[in-house]
Image: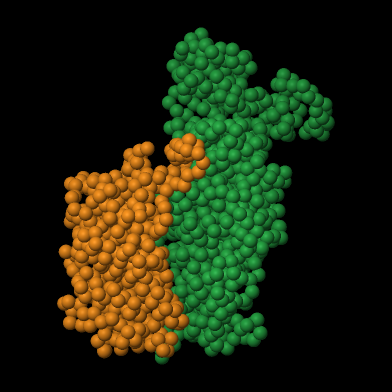
Amino acid sequence: MNAPYIITRRRLLKAIAGAGAVSATGTLEGLGLSAALAQSAPVTDYKALVCVFLFGGNDANNLIVPMDTAEYNLYVTARGTTASGGVAIPQAQLLGITPRTLNKNYGLHPAMTNMKSLFDAGKMAMLTNVGTLAEPLTKAEYTAATKARPEQLFSHSDQQLQWQTSVSKGIERTGWGGRLADVVGPSNGSNFPMITSIAGSAVYLNGNTPRVVAIPSTGTFGLSTFGAAAATTARETALKNIMNLNAGNDFVRESDDLFAQAIGASDVINPIITATNTTITPIFANATSNIGNQLRQVAKLIEARNTIGLKRQIFFVSIGGFDTHTNQIASHNTLYGQIDAALKAFYDATVQMGVANQVTTFTMSDFGRTLKQASGGGSDHGWGNHQMMLGGAVRGQEFYGTFPNHTLGGPNDVSTNGRWVPTTSVDQYGATLAKWFGVSPSNMATVFPNIGRFSNTDLGFLS
Amino acid sequence: MEIQLKNCTDGVRRIRVATSMLLATGSCCALLMNPAHAQTAGTVDSIEYYNARTGQYYRTDVANEITATDQNAVASGWARTGQSYKLWRTQADAPAGAVPVAKLTSLNFANPAAPQVCSLSKTGKLTQLGVVGSGCVPQTSVTYALMPDAGGNCATGTQPVYQASASNNSRMANQLSVYQDMFDRGWNPTGISLCVPGTSTAQDADIYRLLKQATFGANEALMNQVKQVGITSWVDNQLNMAAQSSMPALGFYPTQQATNCTNNNVTGSAEQICARDNYSLFQVQLRFTQNALTKQDQLRQRVAFALSQILVTSGADSSIMPYGMAKYQQMFLDNAFGNYKDLLTAVTLSPVMGDYLNMANSNKPDAARGIAANENYAREIMQLFSIGLYDLNLDGTVKKDAQDNLIPSYTQTTVENLARVFTGWTYANFNNATPPTRNNASYYDFPMQPVASNHDTTAKVLIGGFVLPANQGATQDLNMAVDHLFAHPNVAPFIAKQLIQKLVSSDPSPAYVARIATVFNNNGAGVKGDLKAVVRAILLDAEARGPIKTVAGVGKLKEPVLLALSAYRGLGGVNDGVWVRTQYAAMAQDLFRAPTVFNYYAPDNTISNGKLGPEFEILTSTTAFARANFLRNVTNVNYAIDATVTGATGTTVDWAPWQALAANPAALVDKLSWIFAAGALSTSSQQQIVNAVNAITSTDTLSRARTAAYLVLTASQFQVDR
């Protein structure tokens, strides 16, 4: 059959027709799509971006802790000692790290032993106090409301969307991963879906043209058959033909399109993820959590990159459970332990495949959390947060952005509970990744419609 | 000829001899004529023909034309399609409000190579097709039909006729499956054009559609039940029926599994069953599934399930014990037709919610230790359970300020104040024997109880400057805050729209939302939040009633739980729910284990053209296969009895009734289309399935039945309710 994931003319026209209505910012017009289609010089090298989304709002105040005495004391005072039911990690347990150009010591969460090694080896970096912003914003401007704030700060669903869309005002239905694919896709050398999610659907993945395939973290990816061969053939023929019969209904068509795309993609993907001769599996022997399984699938697909034929791929994996209003110490030990093992295995896999410099992994999360502890051994919803970037192309052993002042009610706190106003925006974070991925300056505003509001569009953490 | 006794409007009961000829002279009480009478007298048949040479359709109700067309079939190429419906012969035969309908056409049999056709249109307007002016002669006589009402539906006793047109062609159809087909043939379908005598298929279609909305799946027996009492009475019976379903009464178990069900790694051991039954959601999921498969209070269960996906707690949070989840879900069964405010209060005080969103043991702020009141429940009761993020109009659309900005319905300051309202609550003491005096460990048998010393007694300022004065107790503060939230004008559209989405369609019209929100605000007796009145209004609304809607934007993808249960309820057989229970998770709806308080999917998730489609959030290429492969197992595998489950019967579809139809694939598929697609599976889709069935030897009736069922169930036209 024809590969049904190839963009149909109908859907392309629909995307163009709908593009003007999509964005509240007024900068994602059909113009952007036209520009994307015009940029079609084929690329020859392989690159992949892997987004690890930490659902629930990761409290990175406990991922990176300042070690200098005065700053650590501020941290303990706000968080409370574990002995008193608080969430401050004892200083002796923290894994000491020293960013290359900062004359300061910090501590990584004790579960992040492998990440400490990769940080020290220069393969990992941190972006500190990054978050959703409509434009650059100081605490004074926030308080006086003289500049735009992101809408619905501190709300899970809205802040997840804003991280994924880079748009903090109004309702935006495309994500920056999807728009990145829109821009790069036409020069990508294959009609295979450019975006693979091992974590279901996410707005981050939605572009103006659909290029997403979602695969399971384990098991097979395809139709199970039954009965005699002739009956099976007749049944599959009917099933595929019925997919083209939508009875004029939007929802029937949407369901059929998804199903048709899945069947087209499974012919290629299923042999890859069920192959027994992969060199990837043993590397993940110590990373058998769900996030480990997801990243193993990503590694298998990268291993088969020549079969798939894409020169640029975007992957999406996720791990939930970070909404730690209570019981945060135990939750973090588990979750960070899983992430540490999974990211280590994934990085090692890229080294073994010889693509470590061509694969960049990065984290996102709903928001940071209050530095001040919440009743019950946890923390409440915050704003600016720290993120990890991992890969051979990362200029590692370094902090980017500006580490927040931990004084409650201080210069970075828009409340009295330790909610940091971000000093770096999601747009800048994403644009740095997108530039490395091959997006030209002229196309950057198609991917990040508000990037023009920020002066520094390359934070410098990728080479 | 028939002889009838008629009570006429003048009070005189007359004998009337009814033949089509006599009726043409008029009837003494035509306006009171019942539909059954209409079908047997005073009507004429409109017969459809198709010409394979020209690809044209043609219809006539003129007897001599029918005769002439049939006689000239070979020469002219015109053949009956098998489609026909009735029209009223005269104004007097028809109910009040009937409009004249131009009769068809004459057909130029003189030149069979280039037959000229005129099409039927409504209100007497004749549309010429073919070469204008050559052999297409308007008839002077007319027949009569009704027009659809303002809601687009046909009156009781009549059935809809749909119209579709294409270049040089036009088609009228009273069968939805035929009309549905015209969409995929590139025609321009224009919806219901006429209402004509006859009730059977339209009424059946409406009932099957109702059963998609109000139950966990239709079958023929249930359809016949509804048909006997009528849709309104059936809905009222469901609303007034005492609860038949309940959650299992699981006893209190302490949270330490290892000390209660030891050695639970041994397969089939008593300890393992102990762990399964008390430390996993097995019994809760199983009972839900059994209730949905067998209990009569289907509407109560559907509404309870809908509410459980608005007021979400999740067993994915490992601290939530199964006995607590059973009680939490029982609360929705108990309150499904109660008042939303009572439910909101019960949820707020539920120890399960208290555990899930951390209101339990949230103490007043402790400045000395630097601890703030926990904001989790305070935020979500506003964002998800009552008013939502933005000010809404009654019709569910967002309000805008003068600068065209959305208007947030609360601020972070509101959240912080409300968090202090909800301080000072903890789990009850065991058996609630005494009031708690300090924070207790989790215990779900009773609502949370206040501990005065942990409650913040300073004043709180809520939405719109509403003040809870200082020095109020925890209970008084909580009740006032819930009252205050419930009085907010957002509650009606916010909750009404979500209930419509869960029961009827994903992207309801603002007018539909407004009608239901109005009932939410006032049930007719001055009461706000009466869920019984709200559910009744949702199901009996014009947008919900009538056969399957044929407009592009009406529909709702079946969520996985509904997909699974509908398949089994429709096919029939023996089913203990043990296997079905296990299947929801693979399709991304692990029952009562939503990933977060935001449920499995968001009510404002959109499909690619911008229409709201919540359930599509969990339809990906992965779950598309999971759904299809689940249905492959439904239609192909018998599941044996699990001896460790009391009363287990295994899961086996009874294929005998379906095999009995297997010799006639078209009849088999048509029957499946009725039960699973309310009679609207398009004819081309049906033909595809018939082709697949015909590829199997006719003696293998089991494979034929299974193949037909698999293809109907995997069709998006079944999986999308509309």
Residue in view at x 46 percent, y 59 percent: B602
**Image quarter of the C terminus of chain A:** bottom left
Q: Position of residue A179 (x, y in %)?
A: 29, 53
Q: Is residue B455 above or below residue A315?
A: below
Taking the spot 59% from the left edge, 72% from the top edge, the residue there is B271
Q: In the depicted view, which residue is nearer to us: A181 or B337?
A: A181
**Which residue ends up furthest to the bottom in the rendered image?**
B368
Tell whether A346 sits left or right of B709. left
Note whether A324 is above or below B509 in the view shown.
Answer: below
- Compared across the picture, whether B236 is left or right of B618 comes to right
**Picture layout, residue B424 above or below residue B307:** below
Q: Does the image show residue A444?
A: no
Q: How many numbered dots are placed on residues in this image?
A: 0
The hue in which chain A appears in the rendered picture of the protein: orange
Name the image colouring. Answer: by chain
Give percent across and percent down for residue A420.
Answer: 31, 76
User: Residue B10's spot in the image, x, y percent?
Assistant: 80, 32
Image point (52%, 68%), residue name: B315
Identify which residue is drawn at 67% across, 30% down.
Answer: B94
Residue B512 shown left or right of residue A172 in the figure: right
- Residue B58 in sight from this viewpoint: yes
Q: Is residue A133 above or below residue A4?
A: below
Among the chains, which one is green? B
- The answer to whether residue A315 is left or right of residue B429 is left
Q: Quadrant of the N terminus of chain A?
A: top left
Percent of width and height locating residue A135: 26, 66
- Rendering quarter of residue B353: bottom right
